[in-house]
Image (cartoon, rainbow, N blue to C red):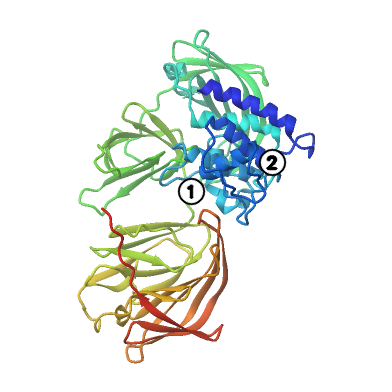
Amino acid sequence: MKKRIVTLVLALALVLSLAAPALAADGDEILTRGEFVRALYELSGEEEMEPRQAYFEDVPMSGDLAVAVRWAVQNGIVNGYGDGRFGPDDPVTREQMAAMLYRNAQRLGQGFQGMWMFLLDYPDADQISPWADEAMHWVVMKGIIIGTDKGLEPKATATDDQLALVLQRWQESVYPEEEDGQNPVMNFVGEYQCDRAHAVVEAEGKDLARVVITWGGSAWEQGMWVMSAPLDPETLRADYDNCTMCIQSYKEDGSLDTETVVYEDGTGYFQFSEGSSFVWHDDREDRDLTFEWSFVPPAEGWTREGYFINEAGDLLSVIWMDDVDEPGWYVGCMIGELSAGAIVREEDGVLRGELQTWEEGAAPLPVTVSEEGEAGLLVTLEGGESYHFLPWEIPEATIFVHINTEGDGNIDYAEGETAPEIDEEYPFQSAQINLAEPTAYTFTAWTKAEGWRFVKWTKDGEDFSAEATVTVELAESAEYVAVFALGDGEEDGQNPVMNFVGEYQCERAHAVVEAVGKDLARVVVTWSGSAWEQGRWVMSGPLDPETLRADYADGRMTELVYDDSGEVKTETVVYEDGTGYFQFSEGSSFIWHDDREDRDLTFEWSFVPEEDGE
């Protein structure tokens, strides 16, 4: 299968290079959207799909392009521009190419699973369109698309000379080749020393040796060489031609200050021996250095605490916890699709224990965490699989928001506010928000559990607010907790809005009324202008139990545009300071008066029966 795909990749590159239009830039032919979709379809080896319908007005009903586009639409790989066009002759950008590659990988079971994190360290990473953000992270992480001397260039046009390499990298990621036996470098993995130089040897893939050498020129400066090459199992020699050498300078607190790349094309070789040493020959310096295997005894007592990250974007936390029955070191990790954590024991300078995974019914995961280098950690899982981590600097302002109703509780966020997604199915929830800069957050605490009521918000254990909806300017780490209780307590009965909670209809407008806190009515109105456009209003105000009127001054109106698949394509905030009121009646209706439009709309209560099913 893999050989066939490689052959197809090369053949497609040849065909498309001959067929590409004469739109060359600096000698490269422009790659179009239609050509790229044709390449993906041919690469799949799949048959034409039914039904044979037209999805875009600018794509013909028959021909190779029509077949390829139909296949791409029906597999969720392309959506078009949202206005009925696909743009087959338009140049394909790097981020469009990334999105198509990622969606194609997802349908084959690849892509990010669950929570994920991978840092894009490029100056123009903020130029990536939201719809291509996850895709670009994945293709860069997999090495399918790499940066240029200008950055990632997400809006730049792709060229046909990039096609063969990109498709080959993609298929190698999606269809990894089975390895024949163990990488011979595994016999030499470890840390080595040579005077003031330190080396780390790692095994990668089938036969690659990756060597990182650091040489301290002073307490504030060091040189770093990173090289990789296949190891010949007969001669035990690895020749490299990709050495990157950089100079790193450090601040007084030991953190990295600057990193300057000196060159990226160094050549040389490593000659390993059956013993515990290897010789590094550097062509540029024309010198040989002999490195001896070194054993670094563990420190007395564990000292490294905080958050750590590796090159793949996996995360590790090591935190001392003393507010539990048995104080100890908590180890939590997110490695690939694995998420696990537990308090472990310290033995002879290393941490050992069994982590509990979040997968239901899964067995505990034995793990060992040991110090590595000057600041890193080495995580070893059962079976010998190991991961190397370095300290990760989390943005300075962090908030943990907790809610616990002992029933069915939720944290609701005002629409459009900066906030993480919260799964409403769990009674206890926590959200961690990392802030690069102080940001305003709005939280609304509420619960569906019968008999439970909101009491107050606390901040770092102190009373903060009796209002269910709070807006805070976060400039420092803090913990906000929403407190709930059973029964009426000191409240004078339930929120009067509870008598009007439900769904309402007014022609093409739909409204949802919710009770929040002590007396707030939260109303969300949606109005469909067409199958692809919708207006949304979100408002809240206290309900007067005597007049049954709720005045609001926080009306937020947004316009949403959908693509053919029903996904939100754009969301535009029109205003955030709308005023008006809701006049409820004892019956099953209410009137919405909007000051901005100076109009009254009457909404009638609607009952939506639950669907049958298991």
Question: How many labels, in total?
Answer: 2
Q: Is residue 282 left or right of residue 377?
A: right
Q: Is residue 372 left or right of residue 56?
A: left
Name the element at disc 2.
loop
Q: Which mark is residue 32?
A: 2
| Residue beneath the point at 58% across and 24% down | 6
Q: Is residue 310 above or below residue 578?
A: above
The percent position of residue 358, horizontal first and vertical second, equals 30, 45
Instruction: Using the image as rendered, state which of residue 272 and residue 561 is in the foreground.
Output: 561
The percent position of residue 81, horizontal first and vertical second, equals 62, 53
Which residue is tagged 1? Answer: 393
The percent position of residue 453, horizontal first and vertical second, equals 26, 73
| Residue beneath the point at 25% across and 81% down | 491
Instruction: Using the image as rendered, state which of residue 335 and residue 28 is in the foreground.
Output: 28
Name the element at disc 1.
loop
Instruction: Using the image as rendered, state which of residue 450 and residue 375 is in the foreground.
Output: 450
Q: Is residue 328 left or right of residue 17?
A: left
Identity, as a three-letter code, of the amino acid under mark 2 = Thr
How packed mark 1 is, by other alpha carbons closer than 10 Å (few <14, some 14-19, many 20 or more), is few
Q: Which mark is residue 19?
A: none
The percent position of residue 401, horizontal first and vertical second, equals 37, 62
Identity, as a three-letter code, of the amino acid under mark 1 = Glu
Instruction: Using the image as rendered, state which of residue 171 and residue 264 is in the foreground.
Output: 171
First in sequence, mark 1 or 2: give its number.
2
| Residue beneath the point at 44% across and 37% down | 109
Residue furthest out toward the bottom: 546
How packed mark 2 is, by other alpha carbons closer than 10 Å (few <14, some 14-19, many 20 or more), is many
Q: Is residue 162 above or below residue 307?
A: above
| Residue beneath the point at 27% across and 40% down | 344
Q: Is residue 425 above or below residue 285?
A: below
Q: Is residue 479 visible?
A: yes
